[in-house]
Structures are given as structure tokens and as C-alpha cells.
Amino acid sequence: MRFTKWNFLMLVLGSLIYVVDLIIDIWVSVNFFYKGQHIFGILTVSFVLIAAGVVQCFSFMWYKEDFQKTGQKGLNCSLLIHCFQGGIFTRYWFALRKGFCLAFQCSNSDDLSGGPSLTQDPMVTTPSKEELADPHQTVINEVADLSMLRLFEIYLEASPQLMIQLYDLMESDQVGFSQVAAIVISCCAISWSTVDYHIALRKSLPDKKLLSGLCPRLMYLFYKLLTFVSWILSASLLTLLNIHLSLILLFILWLSGIAWACKQQTTFCATKCMEILYRVVVGFILIFTFFNVKGENTKFPMSAYYFMRVLATVGSLVVFWFCTSPNENQNFFRVITIIIIVTLLLGILFLIVYYTSFHPSKSEEKKIFDEIDGTTPPRACRIRHFLMQ
């Protein structure tokens, strides 16, 4: 497993998307305040701050675990950087630095540490023997951590923001190009972050087959994008009809996701408090898309999840049209309804095609533990205990 130039370019693209997403968040919140929609503006800023706080918390705890394993000092400096929301930028900086070294310049593992100047930095953990033996896997694991943190942020922040933007769009009489563009960009960013996480997950686990090839990735992207679009639109329609009913439905789904994560007895975090926070985040993600939280057989839970998703979507449409009085915007809502039904059917179709024809087969995945040969298994990366698909 090597960190290639293509992987480095994707890492650069991910860092740029992260910066652009921050700019869009600021623009959306300022735009709400400018139009006098202070509640929407406050909610948007609140979701940004909550997501940032959660992500920085997990990032710091991972640095803390790494410092404890290596016996390295500098935890106070790391805490200060994360308090000023610099943890993700720091991770991107060092991942880009190491990744560039491996992809373009360095030829041996000694260069991974970046020389004395890099190892003396309190934000950089000293590489272990296993990491020095396989520097490419080390960088791949760091990229996987970044992808995981990005997945946390995109669902905690962008998904509720998207519902607010859709609610504002459906409620207003005028449809602006900037509104539509922001909504489309948000949907694509959420779906791409999900695909990027799935690719990074399999690349970071030596016993998993890679999601290689353009066609499998496109199938997975369309499956995630279309199912997400159908659900977010139907939830927005229900919110437009009755905001309290919508919040109750989403809250029930959130509690169901948390209960599912607790039932699976996840063991991602080292402390009980962080594990509880992790399950809360998992439950929130499960509101919008399916993930298997234990990496086990997904056939039954996925079937049950999307069966309930279809029922919830159809139920939302029935309630909306049954309780909505005719008005001048009825044609607009008919178009929205058609989009919801078409995207849901196509999303389920892409899901079936992907898992029947393109998903890496478990029977073909190699085992990393070979007791006969007596080889030492590589250090399991942190992402192994996270959401798997």
C-alpha cells in the first residue's frame, strides 16, 4: 500500500474543499442576517460552532492518545491549538507535508519524520517502529483520520444547514440562483465526503479490498447522493407543513440511531464520555444515511433501514399533500414531489446495483494475521473501530 501522487492531489482537493466550505458557511450566515432572518442566521452559526467543537474535541483526544503511546510532551500546546479551532488545519498541514515527501521526494522511511525540525514540533507525535517500517501506511492512516473528522463535520453542520436553506427556499416566493447553487454545492459536498471516507476507510485497512475503478465509485456516489436528496427534500416539505412534527420525527430517528449504536456496543473511544459523544454523533449521521457501526454483515440492517426510509418518505409526502391547501405554489411542490420519488427510486436502484455488482466481496478480502508465518500484524488504525460499510 503506497501513498501515491493521486492520493496527494486528492488530499490537496480535500483541504481546499474544507476551506471553501468554511467560506460558504460564513456567506450563508451573513446572508441570513442581511435579509433580516436572524433566527436562521443564529441556527446556522450554532450548527457551525457545534460541529467545530465536536470535531476539535475528537481531534484533540486522538492527539492525546498518540502522545500517551509515544510518551511525548506538548499536550498543552495541542490543547491550545484546538481551542482556537486549529486542529484540523494542523492535521492537514502535516498530512500534506508528509504526503508530499512520500509522493514526490522521499525514498526512505527516515524522511517521514521530516528531520529534527519536524520531530521537535509538539504537535507531531514520534513515529513508532511499525510506522517507520511502513511510512506510506502512516500517512494513509492520517488521511483516514482527516476523512473521518470531515465526515463528522459535514453531517453535523451541513445537513441541518441544508434543511434550513431548503425551508427558506420553499417558503419564499422568489428562487435565487445563489440559493440554488449553495444547496446543490452542499448536497454534492456531503455525498462526496461520504464517498471519500469510504475510499479512505478501505485504503487504511490492510485486510480490506480497495474501492478501485471509476464505475464502483460513481455507483456509490449516486447511491448516497440520490437517497440523501430524496430524504432531505421530504423532510424539508414536512418542516414547511409543520415544524414541530418534523422536529419530533427527526428526534425519534436520532434516538433510534443512538439506540442502535448502543446495541452494537461500539468501542471506538478510550473513555466512556467520548464513547457516549461518539454514539450521539453516529445517531445523528444515521438520520441522513446508513452506516454499519460494527463492520459486520450489513444485508439485514441496511434492508431494514431503507425500508423504513421509504415508509418515512412516502408518509411525509402523504401527510404534506393531505394537509396542504391549494395555492399558487402547488405546481412548484408537485415538481419537488416528483424529484423526491425519482431520486428515491434511482437511489435504491444504484444501491442494489452497487452491492450486487461492484462492492468488494468479503470473501475475497485477505487476512492480515498469519500465525503460521509468525509475522507481526500491522498496527490497527483508529478508523477500524469507526463506521464501516
Image (cartoon, rainbow, N blue to C red):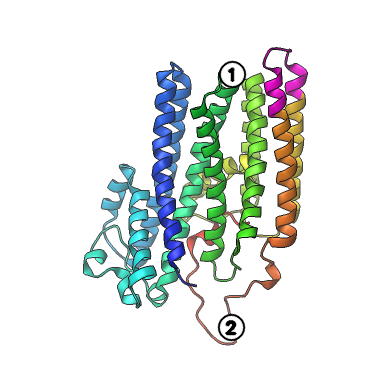
Residue 302, position in %: x, y? 72, 50
Q: Secondary structure at mark 2?
A: loop
- Checking the image for residue 171, the label placed there is 1
Q: Residue at x 56, y 39 (%)?
A: 187
Q: Secondary structure at mark 1?
A: helix
With respect to residue 200, does 330 lie above or below? above
From which residue to which does the magenta span run?
319-336
Q: Residue at x 33, y 73 (%)?
A: 106
Q: Residue 139 vs residue 351: left or right? A: left
Name the outermost residue toward the bottom.
373
Residue 177, position in %: x, y? 51, 28
Does residue 331 belong to the magenta stretch? yes
With respect to residue 8, does 293 lie above or below? above
Number of on-image labels: 2
Residue 53 in sight:
no
With respect to residue 369, does 234 lie above or below? above
Which amino acid is tagged 2?
A: Glu
Q: Residue at x 43, y 35 (%)?
A: 24
Residue bearing mark 2: 371
Quarter of the figure with the C terminus:
bottom right
Does residue 239 belong to the magenta stretch? no
Residue 307, position in %: x, y? 77, 43
With respect to residue 45, does 214 lie above or below? below
Closer to the N terminus: mark 2 or mark 1?
Answer: 1
Residue 174 in sight:
yes
Q: Quadrant of residue 206?
A: bottom right
Q: Nearer the viewer, mark 2 or mark 1?
A: 1
The secondary structure making up most of the magenta span is: helix
Q: Residue at x 41, y 20 (%)?
A: 33
